[in-house]
Amino acid sequence: MLPAEKKHYRKGLTLGLTLAETFSIVVFILLLACAVLLRFEQFQRDTAEAQRDTARVDLQITREMLSPESSSWGNADAWYEYARQLRDTVETLAERAAAAESERDRAVLRAAEADSLLADNGVGDEVLDRAARLASERDSLQRAASESERRMHEAAALKDSLAERLAEVEQVAEQLGDEVAGRGGLTAEEAEEIVEQAARAAGLRDSLEAARRTIGTLDRELRSTRELMMMDQDSLIDSLRAGLDESRFREDTLRSRVWDAERERDDAVGRAEYREAQLEQLSRGTGVDPPPCWLDAEGNPEYVFRIELTDRGMRIFNIAPRHRITGDPEAAGHAAEIEEGREYSPAEFLRVTQPFHALGVSRTEAFGAMGCRFWIRPVDATGDRKEVFQERQRALWRRFWFRW
């Protein structure tokens, strides 16, 4: 690599990337992971709702099959068809109950493992010992720095005092020199006194130089102590932060795992209990589903839409009776917002028909705690594509009730 190329070569933290670029990539990955988790949770919620609606439909069919007022018991073919549906429903519910039971057992095991792991892996003793040791070293360095600073202040005061005394001696020497020059000679006593003053001045100079050297030494020691303290303080803070962050991360991870395991356990227990209740109701031949929102004089449901199931979605046609349009303005208003004959995708179908499901559920005062459901006439136009038909049928069950 040429020197000119080295001059412009990027030197980042990781793989040639700067800190900002690396942080942006990490944030993007975290957002992508959150989106995947939210999508998976939505898929699980939709699956659970579809299973719930399917179970309710199975129970409704069973109730109608066992009801003596049903008009469908008039021929042997209907008897055979209902018996076959009952057998398939019982087998399906039994499989779902077994699966829910196994999920509950697995969730219980995971919760127990997470509880044990959380109990055994708290904040490590070595992290606590290291934090205490670093804190003690930090306090010791702070005390040493304070002592060095105090000694430096004392030496500075001594230097100022010596400088003042030296200035006084030099002033006396100048005065003596002036007197000697003015009188032209000295006596023996005067000469001895001048010598003694000069000796004292020399001693003061030596003391002043020693004090200056001491002050310089103390100043260097203080600077080195401060640098060491700041360096060790940064290291201490970084070590404490790293240890505490690691401990907090481990604790948060374990708590999250325990919470997820407990939630899965509760969900599995709830699903198992719900399936057991369904099997019990199925064996008794009783039903607990909400009634149709519209009934004619003979007690049969009146239909709000005719919906064709196609390969690309659903076509909706309004077939509500005229007296229902005027007698139920809320449902009529929601029906007017739907384009008749348009082919909606499954997602669009669920969005535009959500008001009908919410309206039926809200009518608890007239129909009881579970409200009511609007009925439709389905038409299968998917051909022999069984998977597409099943997917469209699940979407229908999430919003309406019907029978083929």
Image (cartoon, rainbow, N blue to C red):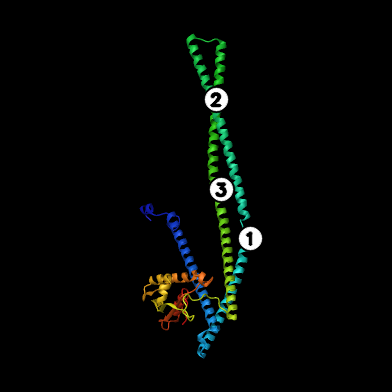
Residue at 42% x, 75% y: name it.
324
Upstream in sequence: badge 3 or badge 1: 1
Report the Cα–Cα distance between label 3 and label 1.
28 Å
Q: How crowded is mark 2: few (under 14 residues within 10 Å), some or many (20 or more)?
A: few
Q: Residues within 10 Å of mark 1 (few under 14, many from 20)?
A: few
Question: Residue 121 vs residue 65: left or right?
Answer: right
Q: Is mark 2 on a helix, strand or loop?
A: helix
Q: Where is residue 70 in the image (x, y as percent from the top left)?
A: 52, 84
Amino acid identity at mark 1: Ala
- From the image, state whether disc 2 or disc 3 is nearer to you: 3
Q: Position of residue 276 (x, y in %)?
A: 59, 76
Amino acid identity at mark 2: Ser
Q: What element carries label 3?
A: helix
Q: Residues within 10 Å of mark 3 (few under 14, many from 20)?
A: many
Upstream in sequence: badge 2 or badge 3: 2
Determine which of the numbered discs, if any, sits on residue 161 in the image. 2
Determine which of the numbered discs, if any, sits on residue 381 in the image. none
Determine which of the numbered discs, if any, sits on residue 119 in the image. 1
Upstream in sequence: badge 2 or badge 1: 1
Q: Quadrant of the N terminus?
A: bottom left
Report the Cα–Cα distance between label 2 and label 3.
41 Å
Q: Are marks 2 and 1 in contact (CB under 8 Å)?
A: no
Q: Mark 3 points at which residue?
A: 236
Residue at 56% x, 81% y: name it.
90
Residue at 55% x, 51% y: name it.
241
Q: Do the residues labelled 3 and 1 touch (CB within 8 Å)?
A: no
Report the Cα–Cα distance between label 2 and label 1.
67 Å
342 or 199, which is in the foreground?
Answer: 342
Q: Is mark 1 on a helix, strand or loop?
A: helix
Amino acid identity at mark 3: Leu
- From the image, state whether disc 3 or disc 1 is nearer to you: 1
